[in-house]
Amino acid sequence: MRSTELKLFCRKRCLHFLKDSIPMKKPIVTLGGLLVALGFMAGAARADITIATAGPMTGPFAIFGERMKRGAEQAVADLNAAGGVLGENVKIVIGDDACDPKQAVAVANSMVNKGVSLMVGHFCSGSSLPASEVYNEEGILQISPASTNPMLTERGLDNVFRVCGRDDQQGTIAGNFLADKFSGKNVAIAHDSQAYSKNLADAAKVQMNKRGMNEAMYDTIIAGKKDYSSFVTEMKLNEIDVLYYGGYHAEAGLIARQMRAQGMSTVLISGDDLVTGKYWAITGAAGEGTLMTFGPDARKSMPAKPVVETMRKGGFEPEGSTLYTYAAIQVWAQAAAKAGSLDIGKMTKILRNNTFQTVLGEITFDGKGDIKQPSYVWYEWSKGKVVEK
């Protein structure tokens, strides 16, 4: 109920209450006092619209959670400065799932209790998938800025969207790249068995095989180890020219370093998780020439320019998922304005039938909740910087 409606409601109800319950011989409430009380009640009852973002705020992937948090906070600050959403201020709450599925479900349930209208998250697909079941059951809109597992939008959940690409799209691009650039070379494909990692590796393998090229080696590693020298030695014995690694930057960084330590010149190719300075912090010069797919750098787009400048002035570089998180909130706010409501049914219909202007550029969704725009380009680590190819 809006504050103006609440004031009228309270005025009628409170006057009836006063007439029926206060003895007329003791007129203790003045008209001025009543109006003050009504104003206080209406003001106290008025609540901000609460939205949330959730991701790995702690743990080995905390850098990504920090980017989501910063992007969400900046988007909310900018929204409120422009008048909020549907005439109300927006409040952001942060959830930490540490990229752990069980913790993600606990976060999702806590967000239900907090009455959030939107979840911008999660980051890891392994968190988004189980948490999405909670949001779907409770009628909460979910827009992920980073979860790329195809199954997130393949289950027919009408409340689930994402502003990033999918692993199968990313892996398919990699498979074509391997076939085009490394024909006749020995290619190894590996992953760490996690959902994100396996989806990337398998999609790359399938597409490369479709192009008539077979891998010389296919293997899995165990995430979280400090020594991958036995895996690297096996690649050396197989004279591997290029490794496509589906996985995260921590393991990829160690593999790159240990390949160079064994005198290997093998090219390392991977996905979007390697677009972080933490990868180079692990590899140093051993990371030179590493290739990876990631979305177009939103910092270079004209719509993002004022946001990027603001965040840089605040001492934060809006890399990676920062602007994707910002864009997800922009999409939600524009959908709410078009719907004139936060009703989940109205919102999802608007989301699937409109184009939204964001820091990423124009965004439109297909019937599954995936974006229709091109979602991946190639990047290279060069002298400690990520350079678009």
Image: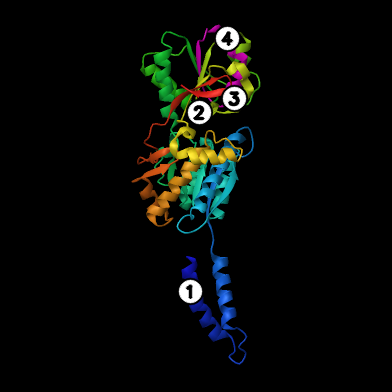
Q: Which residue is mark 4?
A: 264
Q: Secondary structure at mark 4?
A: loop
Spatial separation of the CA atoms under disc 3 and disc 4: 19 Å
The tag earlier along the polypeptide, 2 or 4, is 4
Camera-nearest label, 3 or 4? 3
Q: Which residue is mark 3?
A: 279
Q: Position of residue 10 (x, y in %)?
A: 51, 74
What amino acid does circle 1 point to? Phe
Query: Which is more toward the observer, 288 or 191?
Result: 288
Write the start and end of the magenta stretch as one range: 232-259
Give the CA distance from mark 4 to mark 1.
Answer: 76 Å
Q: Locate residue 368, reporting x and y percent.
A: 38, 40
Residue 189 is left or right of residue 32, and the answer is: left
Q: Residues within 10 Å of mark 3 (few under 14, many from 20)?
A: many
Disc 3 to disc 2, C-alpha distance = 11 Å
Instruction: Name the residue tied to disc 1.
Output: 9
Quadrant assignment, res 248:
top right
**Mark on residue 272?**
2
